[in-house]
Image (cartoon, rainbow, N blue to C red):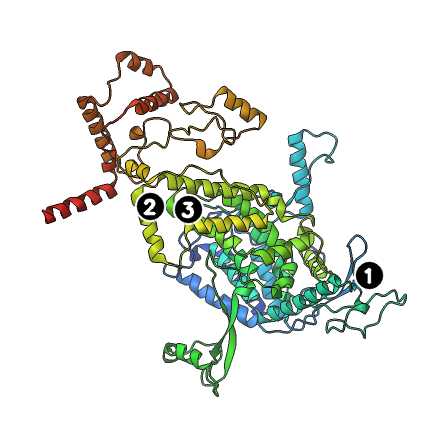
Amino acid sequence: SSNKNLNDPHIELTMLEYYLLLFVRFPLAHPALFGDTVSSSTINAGRSGNGVGRKESNSLPYSSTLTTPYGHQVYSHIFSTYLSYYLPHGLDYTNVYESIIANSGFTDDNGSFQLTEVGITCFENCSSLDRTSELLLRLIIELWLDGYNVAPTTTEALDRYRRIRGGVMNSTDGNDKITPPTLKDSMEMAQPLKCPFEPAPSQIQWMIHDLVRHLVSDRSMRNMVQSASAACQRQFNNEQNGINKYNDAPDDDNIDKNMDTPENNDGIAKIRIPWCLTTPMTAVQPYIYNYIRLALACGPIHVANSIFHRALQTWLVYLEPWNYVMKKRILPSSNVMRGSAPPPTNRAGEFWRNAAATVASSQRYELYPSYVAPRPHSKSAYTLQWEAYVASNLHLYTVPLSIFLKRAREFDFSSNNDHTRSLALVQRVLRIYNKPLVDVINKIVNKKADAVTQTLIARHEENLGVYTPPNDWKLSSCQGDAIILLEEIFMQHRKRLSEMDIIDRWGEKIDILFSGNAVMNEEAAMNKLAAQIQYLVDLPLDYKILPEETRKTSWFRVLRVFGRDDANDQPKSFDNSWSTTPERGPDGKITDRGRKQIAVGLRKCNPLDVHYIGDPMLSRVKSYEIGALVDLTVGLSNYLNTKLGLVPEADSAVSEEGDDMDVRQKLFLEMQRYKNTIFRINLRFLADPRNVILLSIIFWFVRRVY
């Protein structure tokens, strides 16, 4: 309004613009139509960031169209149509951005440079997009990205960090003694300040994902990135050869020698470096950055189809625009209205028409982007042609990665099914960071990039504005989180292997045999993952995730099927000087000498050294056993062992003493009796249905033969 009264705004919109406003606001006003539930609280679509009382729904599984509500499908189709019309691919943005690098040598003795931005930013003077296109994108930013949850600025996050650290340290003389935050603190820095995080409705999460896919698949952006990457590589080679000045560089298409130089004629030249992101992508970059880091830091990780997993998918699409390949398709004939769906007869022969597009013919065809979804264990398709894209989105490659490494420790790696899914999700993220990509990121954060790359980084940080993180953050600061994640994955994997019997192991070998090369062996996949993390966070070459353990023999696994479990037997080498574990007694307890070894730092405890205490036959019911059969077989085993005299009966004195013992002492007593028993009957293996089925098959086969 003219008097700047926020309570009485005055906005003039055309009918089309007003319709777009209602269209973008519709998922906020009616979330129940898309499978979301809303409380009686007032819906707020403004920038206040207040909670709106929505709850995340699990009725829309990811990549599923069978249970997707019809309203979701209709809205998604209309939204994708609007994106194609108002934000079309193939526009010319090359003359939108222009940078001038000052300083005749590009860099001074300290490696810094001077940058002056000329031209425009985002929508100003951009003739490629009209008013309606700009309004649609601004509405998406205001109502979906920026207005739902307010992310803290870097200054606000730093103040909170120092205040919390100062309170913990009881510092009274200021914040000078507080260690500044590093990249590993990104999750803490991303937490909202005023209001708790409230996930957006599922429909908005899907639409943000579609928006990112539409923007990163633009062939205009691809051409701009390749041109800027070529300029970065040429400049890097020139600097390696000692050619640091523009006027000493060989002829290059990017250098505009006809532009006027300053009057002092100090060797400053002007270079034309096109910004490698399109105007719509530049406009949404800071808001996508906040949306991703807020969702990864605050979203529920164990809820299916939560905002954490959807934002993770959006982030992965944003990081890998090279997964889009251009394909050909036949344009519809003139009697079919452009933009409308082809008739059923033409749709049935779409495959043959697309195949005919590769053959020279009179039919017209067009190129369209097609997304090639990578597998968790596949190699990244990143090449140096995308170096400028990484530089222009540097903080989207580092900050969300740090948050993911910290939150990935919450994944469930213990059970068989969840372990496979969690490991695949970690592989899906880390496969992106191959050696060339990590080298580019390290070159940038270590201030060793060329002047053209530094120009793109400066433009990227200027675009992020108040949300730009400190420029001294490095990937190596995430070593602690990476080590904890690796130890959790390998520890749970080793634990699962130790609990597997001979049937489970043979089943795993059969799965690997029939899967062929389609599925990588889990052991090989984990070793590859460890090598990726080791190179990503710069771990030492001799770093060992877990200490080596003694391999169990095949005879041990056969005995384990019949209930003879020696897993709680302690190793006999606790006196060896090369051992990394503290000294333990025959009963498994840490001795006084072992405590001293831990206190002085000579030994450390390993989670894998924690064994079961007690009688294995009396342990709790396993996940693969039937509870009723466990009680029946254990009771029958005790009865037979007592009647046959295989196990001595406990005397009354020990029984009365056991009543006054705590649980731990009782378990140690049971374990001691178990070790003193030479032979006994253990029928608990019959509580495993797999063993019962195997014995039934053997019995049936014997009866048929004899």
Visible in this render: residue 478? Answer: yes
- Tell me if 650 is positioned left or right of 359 in this view: left
Question: Dividing the picture into quarters, in which one does residue 93 lie?
Answer: bottom right
> In the image, residue 577 lies at what x, y percent?
52, 29
Q: Calculate the distance from the C-alpha at mark 3 to the C-alpha at mark 1.
A: 54 Å
Name which of mark 3 and mark 1 comes first in the sequence.
1
Circle number at residue 103: 1
Decide: is 561 above or below 86.
above
Q: How far apart are marks 2 and 3 (CA)?
A: 16 Å
Which numbered marker is on residue 505? 2
Label 3 is placed on what type of residue?
His
Q: What residue type is labelled 1?
A: Asn
Which residue is at the front of the view, 353 or 479? 479
Tell me where residue 556 sits by quadrant: top left
Name, please, the residue furthest toward the right.
264
CA separation, marks 2 and 1?
66 Å
- Evaluate if marks 2 and 1 touch, with contact meaning CB atoms under 8 Å apart: no
Q: Nearer the viewer, residue 342 or 149?
A: 342
The crowd level at tag 1 (other Cα within 10 Å; few <14, some 14-19, many 20+) is some
Circle 2 residues within 10 Å: few <14, some 14–19, many ≥20: few
Q: Position of residue 432 (x, y in %)?
A: 54, 57
Outermost residue toward the left in this view: 706
Residue appearing at x 45%, y 24% in the figure: 584
Under tag 2, what secondary structure? helix
Q: List the residue tagged with mark 3.
A: 419
Label 1: state its secondary structure.
loop
Q: Which amino acid does label 2 sit on?
A: Arg
Please report contact status of discs 3 and 1: CB closer than 8 Å, yes or no.
no
User: Horizontal and vertical percent for residue 274?
Assistant: 69, 68
Determine whether 312 is above or below 670 in the image.
below
